[in-house]
């Protein structure tokens, strides 16, 4: 991302070199992966996952830079990652993703016009944002085209980039979490997988929703809800510590009363469920889709016991896990080190999607 003015847009879709690094900075974990692109199919060759203290990042805001910087460095060291160029991503209320119809023009002219077009659609001072766009449909009639407009507050982008540089890395790409999730999903399902699919990534404090139709984002939003609502509910209802609740929801600790625990999770899921339902309703009202074929969950929250079944029953839609990380080809060294990889795989989805970025895409 760079300056928010005509002709200077953030570079979301480029990558150089035979291998690439995806860095995902979450509120509870730092995740890094390295993907080798030198063979016919991309291969996961390195990954790292480091838990950071809950006070380091609160509701998406960095409260202790030093703790986050140390987490990034520890994660890279743990993974054995030496390359310094990384692709990373942002999300939250300071990011706007919107489909826009504008006068038909070539990409170079669109770069000049997008700044003025964005002023009508972005609820921030246009001088305070970074902009990028992608042409979705070159002709939608009446001499117009449809584009995907992305805007993010400069302050957030600069803070994010500065943090990564202070950790000793170079953020060559700053993407959006929702797009990274889609990139990981398309790895195994193809870019033009038919139907309407909801991609829901449940982080600690933020849930990214991206509803795609035939590979094109139709609706994207971030909810200020995450897996922490389940941890807090479990703490409150069962009188246990935060660490004990984490162990229960991650499967590290045995669940004593499964029926009671399932009810706590079902009750805590209502706010998340409402956010998903509103997103689906908006899509239907806009006429972009009459129904959702399935919804794919990723992120740490996707591992919460019974959540897939609870949401499937609630919405009468097939919810399933995004298994891109589990199914991508892995180096022999990683396979030999497999120690519960499938359990942590959902947490690596964003970082994998970032590392899969290819030039021109």
Image: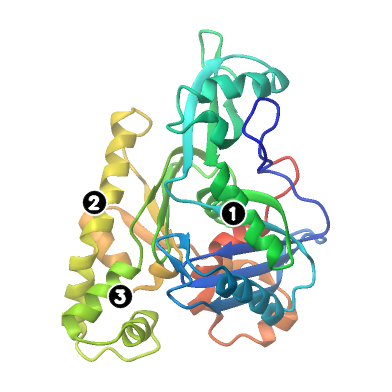
Q: Which residue is tagged 2?
A: 274
Q: Please tell me how crowded label 3 is: few (under 14), some (14-19), or many (20+) other residues with Cα within 10 Å.
A: many
Q: Is residue 147 visible?
A: yes
With respect to residue 234, does 159 lie above or below?
above
Quadrant where the N terminus is found in the figure: top right
* Relative depth, front residue between 62 and 73: 62
User: Which residue is at 53% across, 17% downward?
Assistant: 102
- Which callout, 1 or 3, points at the residue further toward the start of the chain? 1
For mark 1, give the secondary structure. helix
* Relative depth, front residue between 78 and 34: 78
User: Which residue is at 58% across, 63% downward?
Assistant: 24
* Relative depth, front residue between 214 and 92: 92
Horizontal relation, residue 312 to residue 219: left or right: left
Horizontal relation, residue 125 to residue 164: left or right: left
* Relative depth, front residue between 232 and 36: 232
Q: Please tell me how crowded label 1 is: few (under 14), some (14-19), or many (20+) other residues with Cα within 10 Å.
A: few
Which of the labelled discs sits on residue 231, or is there none? 3
Marks 1/3: CA distance? Answer: 29 Å
Q: Nearer the viewer, mark 2 or mark 1?
A: 1
Horizontal relation, residue 159 to residue 235: left or right: right
Q: Quadrant of residue 161?
A: bottom right
For mark 3, give the secondary structure. helix
Q: Please tell me how crowded label 2 is: few (under 14), some (14-19), or many (20+) other residues with Cα within 10 Å.
A: few
With respect to residue 300, does 3 lie above or below?
above
Which of the labelled discs sits on residue 159, or is there none? 1
Mark 1 and mark 3 in contact? Answer it, CB < 8 Å.
no
Q: Quadrant of residue 37?
A: bottom right
């Amino acid at each position: 991302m760079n300056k928010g003015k005509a002709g200077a847009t953030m570079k979301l879709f480029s990558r150089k070199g035979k291998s690439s690094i995806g860095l995902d900075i979450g509120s509870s974990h730092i995740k890094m992966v390295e993907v080798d692109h030198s063979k016919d199919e991309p291969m996961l060759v390195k990954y790292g996952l480091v838990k950071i203290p809950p006070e380091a990042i609160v509701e998406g805001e960095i409260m202790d830079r030093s703790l986050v910087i140390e987490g990034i460095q520890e994660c890279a060291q743990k993974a054995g990652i030496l390359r310094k160029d990384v692709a990373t991503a942002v999300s939250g209320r300071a990011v706007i993703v919107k489909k826009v119809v504008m006068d038909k023009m070539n990409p170079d002219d669109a770069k000049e016009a997008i700044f003025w077009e964005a002023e009508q659609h972005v609820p921030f001072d246009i001088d305070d944002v970074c902009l990028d766009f992608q042409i979705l449909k070159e002709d939608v009639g009446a001499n117009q085209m449809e584009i995907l407009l992305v805007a993010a507050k400069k302050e957030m982008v600069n803070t994010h980039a500065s943090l990564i540089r202070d950790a000793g890395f170079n953020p060559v790409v700053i993407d959006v979490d929702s797009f990274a999730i889609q990139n990981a999903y398309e790895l195994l399902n193809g870019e033009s997988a038919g139907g309407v699919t909801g991609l829901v990534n449940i982080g600690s404090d933020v849930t990214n929703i991206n509803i795609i139709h035939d590979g094109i984002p139709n609706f994207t939003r971030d909810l200020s809800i995450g897996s922490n609502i389940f941890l807090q509910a479990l703490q409150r209802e069962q009188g246990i510590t935060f660490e004990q609740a984490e162990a229960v929801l991650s499967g590290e600790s045995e669940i004593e009363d499964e029926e009671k625990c399932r009810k706590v999770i079902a009750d805590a899921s209502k706010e998340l469920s409402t956010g998903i339902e509103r997103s689906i309703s908006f899509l239907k009202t806009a006429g972009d889709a009459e129904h959702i074929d399935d919804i794919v969950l990723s992120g740490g929250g996707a591992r919460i016991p019974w959540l897939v079944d609870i949401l499937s029953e609630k919405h009468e839609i097939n919810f399933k896990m995004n298994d891109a990380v589990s199914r991508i080809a892995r180096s022999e060294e990683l396979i030999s080190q497999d120690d519960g990889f499938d359990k942590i795989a959902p947490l690596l989805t964003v970082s994998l999607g970032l590392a899969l970025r290819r030039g021109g895409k």
